[in-house]
Amino acid sequence: MGGIIELVHHGSYGVAFIVFFASILIPIAKFIAIAFLAISVRKPANLGNHGRLVLYEVVEFIGRWSMIDVFVVAILTALVQLDFAAAISPGIAAVSFALSVAFTMLAAQSFDPRLMWLAENRVES
């Protein structure tokens, strides 16, 4: 969030929005979507099986591209080491973000979409 605030203060609203969207909004949305899918196999949900399957596929697709932010930070850290002009140190935020991406990817991979269909059959029976 500190980087986004700095970008806004420097007038880079577009870049700040992209960073906010890709680094804050998408990971939070993935956590919420995975939690919803996990809960919906236990309790009936308003969203039908097709909607839940589409949500699962979106989370799977986005998960493949989530590590791009981590790679960008790693590359920038390696390339920009001009202490007299600029210095980049990713710190704990980059590690935390990488872990959140890894955990959402693992959660999406470990979720069995067949459970959605089994839950629907239990409700109908």
Image (tube, rainbow, N blue to C red):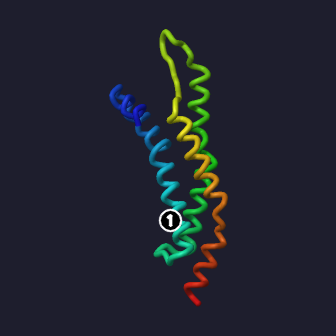
Q: Residue furthest top?
A: 84
Secondary structure beneath label 1: helix
Q: Quadrant of the C terminus?
A: bottom right
Residue name at image x 51 percent, y 49 percent? 27
Bin the neighbour count of mark 1 within 10 Å (Cα to Cα): few under 14, some 14-19, many 20 and up: some
Give residue 19's position: percent from left, percent from top: 46, 38
Task: Say which quarter of the image contains residue 71.
Answer: top right
Number of numbered discs visible in the structure rendering:
1
- Judged from this view, the residue extending furthest toward the front is 92
Location of the N terminus (image quadrant) = top left
Q: Position of residue 86 (x, y in %)?
A: 49, 16
Q: Is residue 90 above or below residue 65?
A: above
User: Taking 44 as reference, is 27 above or below it?
Assistant: above
Instruction: Say which residue appears at 51% left-offset and 55% top-offset.
Output: 31
Tell me residue 55's x, y (percent). Answer: 55, 63
Residue furthest to the bottom: 125
Instruction: Give the residue drawn at x 47%, y 51%.
Output: 28
| Foreground of the two, 21 or 113 | 113
User: Picture quarter containing residue 60?
Assistant: bottom right
The residue at 58%/52% (across/down) is: 104
- Locate residue 11 relative to residue 26 in the image: left or right: left
Residue 109, percent across and down?
Answer: 66, 58
* Residue pointed to by mark 1: 36
Q: Amino acid at mark 1?
A: Phe
Q: Is residue 4 left or right of residue 119?
A: left
